[in-house]
Amino acid sequence: MQVSPSSSTSAGPAKPGVEFVVLLALTISLVALAIDSMLPALPDIARDLGATDPNDRQMVITILFAGFGIAQILYGPVSDSVGRKPAIYAGFAIFTLGSIVCLAANDFDTMLIGRFLQGFGAAGPRTVTIAMVRDRFEGRAMARIMSLVTSVFILVPVLAPSIGQGIMLLSSWHAIFWMLLILGMLTALWFALRLPETLDLSRRRELSLGRILRAIVEVFRNRISLGYMTATGLVFGAFIGYLASSQQIFQEMYGVGKWFSVCFGVLAVSFGAASLLNAKLVMRFGMRLLSNRAQWAHTLLSVAFAFVAIVYDGQPPLALFMAYMMTTFFMVGILFGNFNALSMAPLGHIAGVGAAVIGAFTTFVSVGSGAVIGHAYQGTIQPLVIGFAILGVLSLCATRWAESGRSGETL
């Protein structure tokens, strides 16, 4: 028997099944696992494959996001035409191919090709599962489900660095890719057996370039969608900057050594706790109120801590840095589920293309800004914290602009 997600009705949104939430979380977890399990191995990968610049190792992370962003725009329209599950199957297959290329890599360029393919493939499960949720839920109910999914999903970044580090103690970085290859295949099998198709035949649309372009134009002309997906990309850009430079900050600047996975996991727990709390509060207070308060707190805290970082010449005590990051990650955890739901709210009739456009656009914005922050690393946290502050201010501008289109009218 397959898991059947509950759907929202006029009588009120039903609670989703536990297995539905867990399975969606695991389906999209390949992205986080492919990133976070790799962090402890970055120095060894760079050394073994001949990467010379110390910051080049960050490309193992950022190139995956590049493939992820480009692919999202394809999976959504395909899933609107052939159904959600076939599009996700294609993503799992490409992810598997990318893992094999990484395993066979004997130079840094080949590794980057494999990582690009991994990102290209992982975009399928990540993008289309959001459309699957939107097929059955909307508004606050969707925000609640996305927060529940995120709270389960967050176990991956909590555990992944420790898993990667443990593998490195027993074997080489190649074993991490073997793990990704096997786990991707097992997840695809579980998904195939247990999750039903959510897009009925009557709601499928012909795959045509004209329809896709019209849908893309509709997304970008909708003030609510454009404003909130821009804000999501800006906030996530700072997050990518952190992911790209976290190994250097913790292991090289602060010298935590094998405690890196613990520091990373503590911050991930803060993010996950916020997502779980948001799932409980959003039905009572609404997406806009919660995200607005969290966004202001995140931005003001980052601006203040940027001055603190300058006072300490970019190297504040580890405890102080961790306190700041835990607090700001908590605020970002509140934002993610709500921003995604707000940007998707007007797009139920084109959920597949809508999820694809939003995912691609936010990824391009975040990868560009995150890569700048990561490559600015020079042995201090100043670029990271200043990046959080600047992108936070810009995200506030984006959401304020979006709210001027509260009724959902188009430009």
Image (cartoon, rainbow, N blue to C red):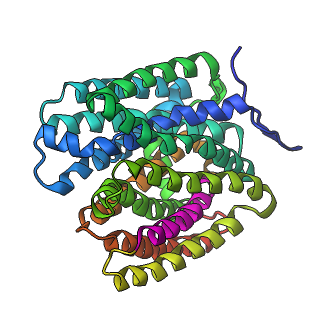
Residue at the (36%, 68%) spot, across then down: 384
**Coordinates of residue 336 in the picture (x, y in percent):** 57, 56
Image quarter of residue 372: bottom left
Q: Is residue 9 left or right of residue 157?
A: right
Look at the picture and state if 307 lies above or below 64.
below
Residue at the (72%, 32%) spot, across then down: 18
Residue 210 appears in the picture as rendered: no
Which is the main secondary structure of the residues drawn in magenta? Answer: helix
User: Which quadrant, please, contains the N terminus?
Assistant: top right
Foreground residue, 161 or 350?
161
Q: Is residue 324 magenta?
A: yes
Look at the picture and state if 170 lies above or below 39.
above
**Coordinates of residue 174 in the picture (x, y in percent):** 26, 28
User: Which quadrant, please, contains the C terminus?
Assistant: bottom right
Q: How many marks?
A: 0
**Coordinates of residue 398 in the picture (x, y in percent):** 51, 71
Foreground residue, 126 or 329?
329
**Coordinates of residue 401 in the picture (x, y in percent):** 55, 74
Residue at the (38%, 54%) spot, across then down: 243
Q: Is residue 22 magenta?
A: no
Q: Is residue 333 left or right of residue 69?
A: right
Image quarter of residue 118: top left
Residue 19 appears in the picture as rendered: yes
Image quarter of residue 193: top right
Question: What residue range appears in magenta?
Answer: 317-342
Q: Is residue 351 left or right of residue 393?
A: right
